[in-house]
Amino acid sequence: MITTAQHRKSLTRSEMTAAMFSAAEAGAQVGRIAKAAGVRQKDVMAVVKVKGNEALNGAVAGTAYAWTFDQLAALGDFADDPKALEAIKEAAANEDADAEDVDWAIRIEQTKREKRRKAEAHRAELEKARQRVRDMAELSERATPVWRLRTPDGQRITAEEHADCNGQVWVLEEGDDDQYKPYCTSPALYGHAEPGSPMGRNGKTTAEMEAEKSARAAVKKGNLEWDAAQTRRRQWLADLVKRRNLPKETVNALVGHVNAALLGGGWGLCDDLNKEPTTEILAILLGLTGDKAKDRVGFPEHVAKDPRRAPQLQFAAVAAVREKSASRAAWRTDGQRCDWVRQPTAQWFAILEALGYQLTPIERAVKDGEPYDPHKKQRAAITASAKPVADQAAADAQTAAAA
């Protein structure tokens, strides 16, 4: 049916997936369906999984959006997460939705899921160490995060100093956090104080506390988008590094960036190249996992020996340094603004854009030096393929690297 229809006219993506699922239901093998449809076997398996699951099928069936095979495959990971499915479906249901919008919604939910996984692992560590773990709802209004605590004479109390306090508990402040935070259940009872007021009373009005709550919510949403963009950006870099044949102008651009970093001395290579966070990022960019990703000295033995890939490998080391420095502080334009982080990160994003990377809204705000409002709906550019750069773009990027 598929091949016959294709000779008459092109099938829509929805018609194609429906026909593939019907064939699978009728008993056709995955390999046979893939061959007839001219797609990958994993594409067929993604269709079968989504169409055969009530929750997943409900997410795609109610929209006119033409789901890609990669999106269907990603959607399969959320069969047990109704909230994530609803958020992705909402993005696809918009009249002007395109692949970039849906990809971004999926990326956000993937980031949330990864944070939950990390939070669960952290909780297991705390419970193993016999620490008290509580839900935020269990705490009274007196409970205060340790970072806010002070001694009665105003001195800061560190997390290490508070570890032996009988009032210490660990809580997950927000559902999307990936780490539990230490709290004191009653600062006044245990002899602590918050800054600006004695023994735990913050002295703020309800309006002031609501304003702080709203600001914290914006920061948390922005941090979530930053983390999602970071994962996507590093995957794009990893794909660029592993490509075997790059256009000559792209290779020249990479060499230019490496030379600017080594000769110009403005990229922090001496300070950051061999630090542990840089090693972790470099392993990601080189595609190294498991034991191979732990020993930096062994990295050269685990990458391709083809000398033609030397520019990519050298660029990966420089990129790892830049990525280490591109922290969350780069997007903040409130009281936590850090221009010494934002400005070099903006230059780095300009280089990546010239190489073909499409910036997300939060990354573009950093590049353009503009404030970013996480609550304002913005279209996302999510095309994760390394594209050849034009000669002028390469020159612009090289100029930015030397700046």
Image (tube, rainbow, N blue to C red):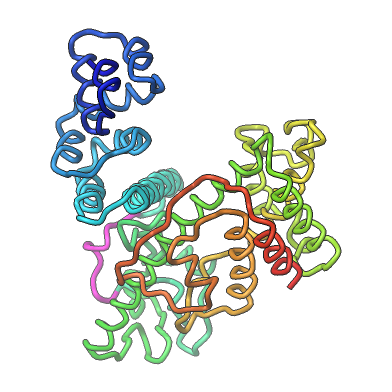
Residue 338 lies, with reference to residue 208, above or below; the image says: above
Residue 294 image point, x, y percent: 67, 39
Residue shown at 34% from the left, 47% from the top? 99
Residue shown at 23% from the left, 44% from the top? 65
Q: Nearest the camera: 92 or 210?
A: 92
Q: Nearest the camera: 178 or 86?
A: 86
Q: Is residue 74 magenta?
A: no
Q: Is residue 140 magenta?
A: yes
Total marks shown come to 0
Quadrant of the image containing the C terminus: bottom right
Q: Which residues are magenta?
A: 133-142
Residue 288 image point, x, y percent: 64, 36
Q: Could you tell whether 325 is left or right of 34 in the image?
A: right
Residue shown at 38% from the left, 58% from the top? 177
Q: Is residue 46 visible?
A: yes
Residue 403 lies, with reference to residue 94, above or below; the image says: below
Quadrant of the image containing the N terminus: top left
Residue 393 lies, with reference to residue 143, above or below; the image says: above
Q: Could you tell whether 86 is left or right of 215 in the image?
A: left
Residue 22 image point, x, y percent: 18, 18
Q: Nearest the camera: 218 or 265?
A: 265
> Residue 78 lies in what quarter of the image?
top left
- Outermost right residue: 263
Residue 80 image point, x, y percent: 23, 37
